[in-house]
Image: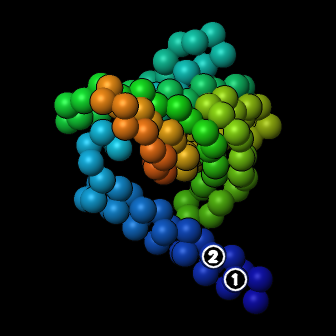
Amino acid sequence: MMKGILFTLTLLLYSATSFAQKQNTETKHPCLLPVLELHNEIKEKLTEGTIPNGKITMRLQKNQACTESVKYEVLRANLIHVRGFRPVATVDVNGNVADLSEMGSKFVPGDRLYMELKVRYTTSKGKTGETTFSHNWVFKETKE
């Protein structure tokens, strides 16, 4: 019974993730689809797929398709360590810094870190707003 419930929850999470990513790429203005960068404790940018270790800083850069000048601020982040279709651990943070020390010791290549960020943006024209942004960081390499 418990395995059935976990399996169902996992499928729902996967479906919601797929829907959210599809919805993000199809309906949002390019300026609302920033590019996510992760930086380690010594401010080095991590290569996509690198397994993070310790504290990370999430930075958002303007999408190349965005023609306006935009500044982004990460308000909140929900980070979920996923192995296959099963969530392993979750970290919720306010702001753009997350401590993955405990979670990171369990990361292995093939796992992923699903990140859902609540973001405030401000354009050069003074327009401000909030949006959500999600990203799957699939681990391909060893820890950095």
Vertical placement of residue 96 versus 130, above or below: above
Q: Residues within 10 Å of mark 2 (few under 14, many from 20)?
A: some
Which numbered tag is attached to residue 5? 1
Q: Residue 81: in sight, yes or no? A: no
Q: Residue at coordinates 35% horizontally, 44% vertically from top-left?
A: 32
Q: Quadrant of residue 35?
A: top left
**Which image quadrant: the N terminus?**
bottom right
- Drawn side of residue 76 relative to residue 2, left or right: left
Number of callouts in the render? 2
**Which image quadrant: the C terminus?**
top right
Question: Which residue occupies the extreme bottom position in the image?
Answer: 1
* Of the pair 80 and 119, the residue shown nearer to us: 119
**Which element type, helix, strand or loop, lies under badge 1?**
helix
x and y, in percent, of residue 18 in the image = 41, 64
x and y, in percent, of residue 27 in the image = 27, 59
Q: Quadrant of residue 97?
A: top right
Asked if labels 2 and 1 touch by Cβ distance under 8 angstroms, the answer is yes
